[in-house]
Amino acid sequence: MISFPVSPMLPEETLPFTDSRFIFETKWDGIRCLAHRDGDSLILQSRNGLNMTASFPEILALGSTLPPGTILDGEMISLGPNGLPDFEFVMRRFNAKSRGIIERLSQTIPATYEVFDVLQHEGEVVINRPLEDRKGLLSKLELPPACRLTGWVPTEGERLFEAVRKLGLEGVVGKLIDSRYEPGKRSLSWRKAKNYRDVEASLLGFRTSPFSIVVGDPPRDVKGVLEHSIPQAVSHLVMEAARKGLAIGIEDRTVWLKPFLRCRVRISGVAWSGRFREPRFIGLSSPFGSE
């Protein structure tokens, strides 16, 4: 028997690819969730081992249909106004604490549990069985309306990636069809390709300890704080601009600058708040006002 809570298997990141040894699934923009039917109880657990059962009452019907002693792996998602899975919305569900708010949000921001793997089936540990066999076990499960099996396609990872890119979804996960499930490990048997895109933003200022640059729209509409992959030459350029009189104030740990440069930023999406998701510095693009 698997001891619960359990750490899920994680994918390595890669570029989109095509390979007949793999199947490919949509990568959902949600919260990783493992579900355990323990006796008469259903327990929902996050990737980090947190109990999230109370936050998603509409999923509890799974406890009536899932065989006892079964552990599933999947993703909890909620749709945003554009009809696509939205991380901010599902996090509102996850963070709700009072019973009244939880019940209200379950009606206004309903969740769906996307199931894509099984670790234990009717008390039998199946992590050492090939993925193809585990998918077969999943196909025989009876799931309630708020739960569904994630579909997959064989071989054509690049074609699926192009389809999800056009739809604005998060990406694709490729999985070796004969792979075993490795709890708590990041493995090349699973490989994710994320739907990043490049945008331009103005350099608004910088922070120290550690050094980071603040980007967005002038004068102080912050879209993101870039902390990694900042070339030393760019750091020196920004600090020199402050010394030469372009600094216009210090507030919220930020040295604000007169707009003088624009930069390219790679992001995985834009939150409904307008903030960039997973922003990463790519390079300088043009002086401010030259576009």
Image: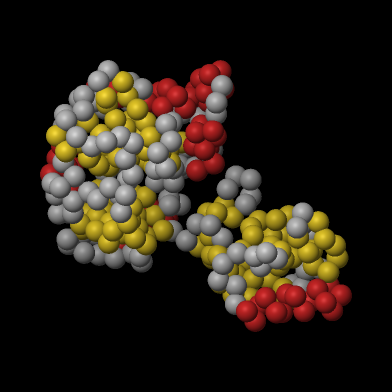
Q: Is residue 12 above or below residue 101?
A: below
Judge by depth and name the residue closer to the eye, 59 or 39: 39
Give the residue displayed 83% in from the left and 69% down from the top.
Answer: 247
Q: Is residue 286 visible?
A: no
Q: Quadrant of residue 256?
A: bottom right
Judge by depth and name the residue closer to the eye, 62 or 285: 62
Report the side of 235 relative to 256 (left or right): left
Give the residue displayed 65% in from the left and 81% down from the top.
Answer: 233
Q: Is residue 122 above or below residue 91?
A: above
Report the side of 234 relative to 169 (left or right): right
Quadrant where the N terminus is found in the figure? top left
Judge by depth and name the residue closer to the eye, 209 or 108: 209
Counting from the top left corner in percent of width and height, residue 194 is at 41, 58
Q: Is residue 248 visible?
A: yes
Quadrant where the C terminus is found in the figure? bottom right
Counting from the top left corner in percent of width and height, residue 179 is at 18, 54
Q: Quadrant of residue 241?
A: bottom right
Give the residue displayed 22% in from the left and 49% down from the top.
Answer: 181
